[in-house]
Amino acid sequence: MDPRGFLTRWVRERMQPKTASGTDALRLAIGSTLIVLSIIALGELAISTLTGTNLWLDLARGMFIGTLIAFPTFLYNAMVLRQNVILQRKFRSAYRVATRNAEDIISKNQELEAAQMRLAELANSDFLTGLANRRRFEQSFANAFGAAGLGGSPFTLVLLDLDNFKQVNDVHGHDAGDAVLQHVAVRIRKAIGDRAGFGARLGGDEFAILLWETFDGAEVAAFAAELQDTLALPHVYHGKTLVARSSISLGFYSAAFSSASEMFVATDKALMSYKHSDEIGIACIGTDDGLSLAS
């Protein structure tokens, strides 16, 4: 055993005593008192040697006085130290509880934010198809029209509906009709792909697509023609083959439209004009600034 290491540990324990219990406090008081008495005994021995007095009498007197003074003092200090240790332990326990509570609060806040985002998403989504609902479409359409009017990028409105959807419902039932609407939504998403834009269900068998930054009208027309061919493909529902062709119209943004509503009405009229045909209606403004339709 290293004497210096032992002495170092002993001094450290005396400087930083562990008083976690009443026994530790009593042990500290007794040990400290013995140290003081040993020092007093050495002092009395030195005094008796120098003065020639009775060593044992001086030693007994010093031990008695030292015990009366030192033991209560060290016992009190030990108890104070023990209370400090208890308070520190309670503080650490309270800190751990507070940390856990803070973590729980953060977790609950994150769950609440996720729930709020989910609610916002549901409020702007069609419950059946998962596409945007009419509310989100109208807001986005108005924003796009306003931005384009202020010099932003042009955009295109695509309207479509199914030509014989009522027949599907009447013959095969509403469950089959719902399945067709869901299949149409999937095909719309795939058709949009990586393009900037989104699809929406306006209600019933009516759908809309907003495409941003459409600088090439021919490219948009090709997109619409391909989408029309895709939607003409049959749907399979519980072994039944269902066909629900679509009619499509395009509304290209133009400053000639005075409002988003006017652009929507023109596009919708183009849709009605070319419904049940293979052609795609295109909404535009005539030279007399009145609404007209052109293919």
Image: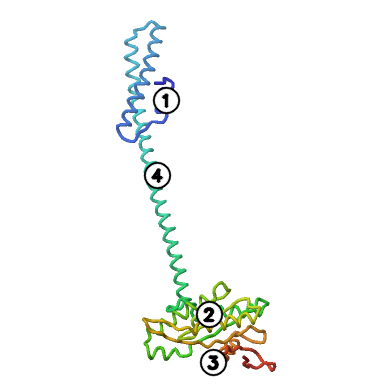
C-alpha span from label 4 to label 1: 27 Å
Q: Residues within 10 Å of mark 2 (few under 14, many from 20)?
A: many
Earlier-in-chain disc, 1 versus 3: 1
Mark 1 or mark 2, earlier in chain = 1
Kind of residue indicated by mark 2: Phe
**Horizontal and vertical percent for residue 267?**
58, 88
Q: Earlier in the sequence, mark 4 or mark 3?
A: 4
Q: Is residue 1 left or right of residue 142?
A: left
Q: Quarter of the image for the C terminus: give it.
A: bottom right
Q: What crowding class fits label 3: few (fewer than 14 Cα within 10 Å), some (14-19), or many (20 or more)?
A: some
Q: Amino acid at mark 1?
A: Val
Say whether residue 288 is left or right of residue 176: right
Is the C-beta separation of discs 1 and 2 under 8 Å?
no
Q: Distance between the Cα atoms at labels 1 and 2?
A: 79 Å
The disc label shown at residue 92, or none: 4
Name the residue nearer the viewer: 14 or 148: 148
Confirm or deny contact between disc 4 and disc 2 (CB under 8 A).
no
**Label 4 SS:** helix
Q: Which residue is mark 2?
A: 137
Q: Which residue is mark 3?
A: 277
How far apart in space, not on screen, are marks 4 and 2 (Cα)? Answer: 55 Å
Discs 4/2, front = 2
In the drawing, what numbered circle is on residue 11?
A: 1
**Which of labels 1 and 2 is toward the front?**
2
As helix, strand or loop, the secondary structure at mark 2 comes to: helix
